[in-house]
Image (spheres, rainbow, N blue to C red):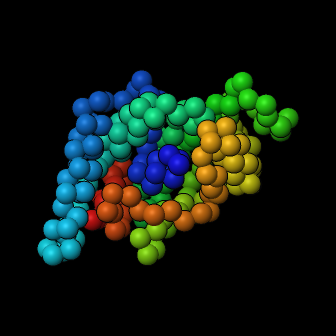
Amino acid sequence: MLFPLLVFLGAVSAADDYSRQEAQKVIGLIGRILEEQSEAAAGGMRKVVLTESELNSYIAYRVEEEHSEIMRELRLKIFPGRRLEGKIYIDLRGQDLPKILKPEMNFYFDGTLEIRDNLFRLNLSSLYLENQKILPELLNTVIYLGSKIQGSEPFRLDDWFELPYGIKNVETELGRAVFHY
């Protein structure tokens, strides 16, 4: 279930176009968050700020390391007010697809990250397949097919997911995400 985590964490660029140094920095910060979770309960909330570039690098690293067979790329632009814009590149070449789906698809979207009770979801404002505005059900269908191909549990775009790594809240600024833990 990599997609919800990627949506939550930020921008992904193509696997060959990222900084391993920035990815390692984020991995180190995740380790620190995990270690400090018990301390945070006693000492109050802490925060870590990551740039789009750092998030891009970390998630591209994850896509590469997890050998994502379907989602090859996810890029998000981060704006104030938890607003996100993004692109998802889906590669279904070699799969038996319904005629409505092309083997390679670029989805573009914008929406707002909603957080409630240690859960998050992305409320879409608009969704496009290439340059054609579409209903979220088409991407839900692609997600369903991809999950069946990969043998993972299917989900929908409007599902709620647990916040990862002890994160309690997220705020966004232009090009930056502030994670509270």
Q: Is residue 58 left or right of residue 38?
A: right
The residue sitting at the front extreme is: 151
Check the image and report above or below for 115 versus 140. below
Please report the residue visible at 46 percent of the width from the left and 47 percent of the height from the top.
Answer: 6
The residue sitting at the right extreme is: 99
Please report the residue visible at 30 percent of the width from the left and 37 percent of the height from the top.
Answer: 23
Give the quadrant of residue 148.
Answer: top right
Please report the residue visible at 45 percent of the width from the left and 63 percent of the height from the top.
Answer: 162
- Of residues 173 and 54, the one nearer the viewer is 54
Q: Is residue 162 left or right of residue 125?
A: left
Q: Is residue 89 visible?
A: no
Check the image and report above or below for 52 versus 44. above
Check the image and report above or below for 105 versus 158. above
- Of residues 44 and 51, the one nearer the viewer is 44
Residue 175 location, x and y as percent?
36, 49
Total marks placed: 0
**Quarter occupied by the C terminus:** bottom left
Residue 46 location, x and y as percent?
20, 66
Residue 73 location, x and y as percent?
52, 35
Q: Is residue 33 visible?
A: yes
Please report the residue visible at 27 percent of the width from the left and 50 percent of the height from the top.
Answer: 30
Residue 121 location, x and y as percent?
53, 63
- Of residues 96 and 108, the one nearer the viewer is 96
